[in-house]
Amino acid sequence: MNFLIITHVRHKLKDGQYYGYGPYVKEMNIWNAHVDNVEVVGHKIQEEVTAIDLPYTSKVRFTEIPQISLTSLKAVFTSFFYTPIIFFKILRAIRRADHIHLRCPGNIGLLGCIAQLFFPKKKKTAKYAGNWDPKAKQPRSYKLQKWILKNTFLTKNISVLAYGDWPNQSKNIVSFFTATYREKQIPEIMTATYNLPFRILFVGSLSPGKRPLYALEFVKTCLNQGIDVKIDFYGEGNQRPLLEKYISDYQLDDVATLHGNQKTEVVQEAYKKAHFLLLPSKSEGWPKVVAEAMFWGAIPIVTPISCVSWMLGEGTRGILLDVQVDSDVIAFAKAIKSPEILQKMSLEGQEWSHQYTLDAFESSIKELL
């Protein structure tokens, strides 16, 4: 089988191997293990490989396409020039493929959605890694991708993998998940103890969409209310200078630590030591870090977006944020007064997350292929 991946993920070339964003590549390596040949249509950038990047374990044929963006007038003009070139390359790659795999949402995913319309007989899958909630406020390009994918008159022979279980979906929509750990890694279910200080993790990019600054505000407000907490940040992004300034301005050096991007093993050890995961994101698909935290017994404190409320059992396996710092800290303060409630949340989170292993994920992929 000739397997084609159409993606917006940026790639780096090192020693003859292509690297990309770790969680994405780790997932695609599972798909790639069950096919004969792999072709990737994507961007290539001239940057150093970092701790968050991983290589494809299969040999890939890489079809490089220009980057496109709509963030400035110059970028729009450049994208207008490059789009026909990218579309032509996608069409040529699809002709070579037996199975088309679209990674959505994104600009390249949108072009892939349109291109696949011309190949109704080819087998396809689409991984919609964003928020599938029909009521969510999203960019028009995202809504267009969702409309094309779920339109069974236009889009043929496809399984669309969407996070969460939503009502009134077309027959080609498959409720899906993603995973990090193998069944053999499932630990014995542990009853957590909550000794002070309460240890909080933030795992994700230090970007506006993840609201890391809000996480610091949350911690500072907790301290002002006499709640003994510490927070560790794992991830990098353009808001790091803002966080460093905030930590300095409010003298939080003893309670807030920025660790940057770290390898999976380092983050895993951090989960094991943490009491809580704080993720006040604006948007998510299936936030892997939430399932990862629950896997090791940490309690998520997360915004109720996408399928997060379902993941948290509508609040029985974690704490749902309003993103109003005073009310969120009040809810947190109420929860920590009852260690029995925290232990129940942690235990239920472990039991729930242990269902979603890479073994179950790989078994589902085999069926799709």
Image (tube, helix red, strand yellow):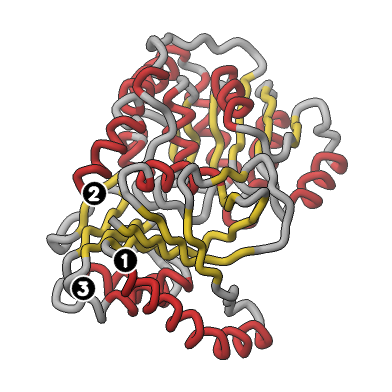
| Image coords of residue 185 (percent x, y) | 42, 19
Above or below, comparing residue 60 to residue 137 in the picture? above
Look at mark 1 in the image and give the residue it sits on: 97
In the visual, does 244 lie left or right of 82?
right
- Are the residues tagged 3 and 2 within 8 Å (C-beta)? no
Query: Quick one: label 2 or label 1, which is nearer the N terminus?
Result: 1
What's the mark number on residue 175?
A: 2
Q: Residues within 10 Å of mark 3 (few under 14, many from 20)?
A: many
Task: Find residue 148 and report its image quarter.
Answer: bottom left
Q: Nearer the viewer, mark 3 or mark 2?
A: 3
In which quadrant of the rendered view does residue 144 lie?
A: bottom left
Determine which residue is flagged by label 3.
155
Neighbours of disc 2 within 10 Å: few (<14), some (14-19), many (20+) = some
Viewer-proximal residue, 59 or 53? 59
Does residue 210 sit above or below 144 in this rendering?
Answer: above
Q: Residue at x 62, y 48 (%)?
A: 205
| Count of marks, rendered view | 3
Mark 1 or mark 3, earlier in chain = 1
Q: Name which residue type carries label 3.
A: Thr
